[in-house]
Amino acid sequence: MVPNYVDAYYSRGNYYNDLKDYNLAIYDFKRLLKVNPNNSRLNFSVSNAFNELHQADSAHLYIDRYIMVNPHLANGYNLQGDIFYDEDKDSLAALAYTKAINLNPNISYYYTDRGDAYYYYDQINLAKADFETAIKLNNKADYAIKRLADCYFDMANYKKSMELCNKALKIDPEYDEAYCLLGQNYGRLKNYKLAEENYQKALKIDSNNRITYYRIAQCFSERDDHMKAIAYYQQAIVVDSTYHSALGSIGWQYYLVGDFPKCIEYSKKALKFDDSAVYAMFNIALAKLRLGDFEAAKSLYSCYLKYCKEKKYDITPGVKEDLDDLIKKNIKTEEAKYILNSILIDI
């Protein structure tokens, strides 16, 4: 292959990379690798493209070739870490990132990458230290700032977490995840109005995020505005029709407003997409009880209890608490007592 064609294929491969058409990029890069299989930049580029396609085995193959030729270059180990991270092999990712850092300790995002890996295998103090180092190396590293805010949120230091979110937003006012984390902080502080306001800001930036709609719905639910909550859970389902948590939550909101048939309908929909949705199972049984069908309720409680034991699903305390609540409110008192003392006695 003549040099002009080599440059042309490489340029076109990079062009496809920029377009995120990774299969075409790989096609061009691999044509060049047939001529020069040990070319470092080609092996790196092919590995990166396979990683973007979440094809870990192929990504590892080509980055291993790159590292074998360039064991002294940090970027190879960093990409190796990215591949492990994409496979959810966080401890291996952290080891690879550490090799990159040892070779070049002055790259901010190497620490951010390792911090992410530490965070996701519950090494929060190590993650926090890495995010702090990343920020020292680059005080405009908005992602590292937000991730440090995540650490403080998990440590229940909501004031510090919010301070860091606002710092990230000064760097990037369109940082929707920072607004979402602000919302989570206000939610933990039970200020659901401010929580909702921040989620709404995030929604203006990304109107296609199911979790943001879900969290806004939770804010309305906490303020006992159940129909508003249902409306936002419905928006989450518009984004993702299989979102079982939203479907189940709609069912529970309908239970709270006394529409027990709707509770059953949406709880069944949740179970269609997640057969481990224990809360939805027992909400159906509870709604049947409220509709006055005691025999059906008893049968459902027994069947669901047996199913959960067979599958080894955890049964949340809320299952019994909902029945206790009926007893306190003098609703279906004898029936609720029977279910608690005869069916659910062992949980």
Image: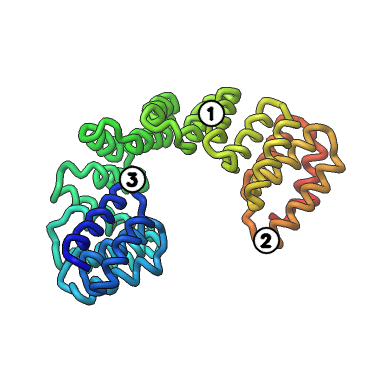
Query: Which numbered marker is on residue 232?
Result: 1
Q: Amino acid at mark 3?
A: Asp
Q: Amino acid at mark 1?
A: Tyr
- Up/down of 260 relative to 89, above or below: above
Distance (Cα) linking label 1 and label 2: 32 Å
Q: Which residue is mark 2?
A: 311
Towards the viewer: 314 or 147:
147
In-image side of 333 versus 189 (left or right) = right
Quadrant of the image for the C terminus? bottom right
Q: Which residue is mark 3?
A: 150
Say if residue 257 shows up in the picture: yes
Residue drawn 85% across the image and 37% down it? 293
In-image side of 12 versus 219 (left or right) = left
Dot 1, how many residues are within 10 Å of its Cα: few (below 14), some (14-19), or many (20+)? many
Decide which of tag 2 and tag 3 comes sooner along the chain. Answer: 3
Task: State the scheme by which the image is colored.
Answer: rainbow
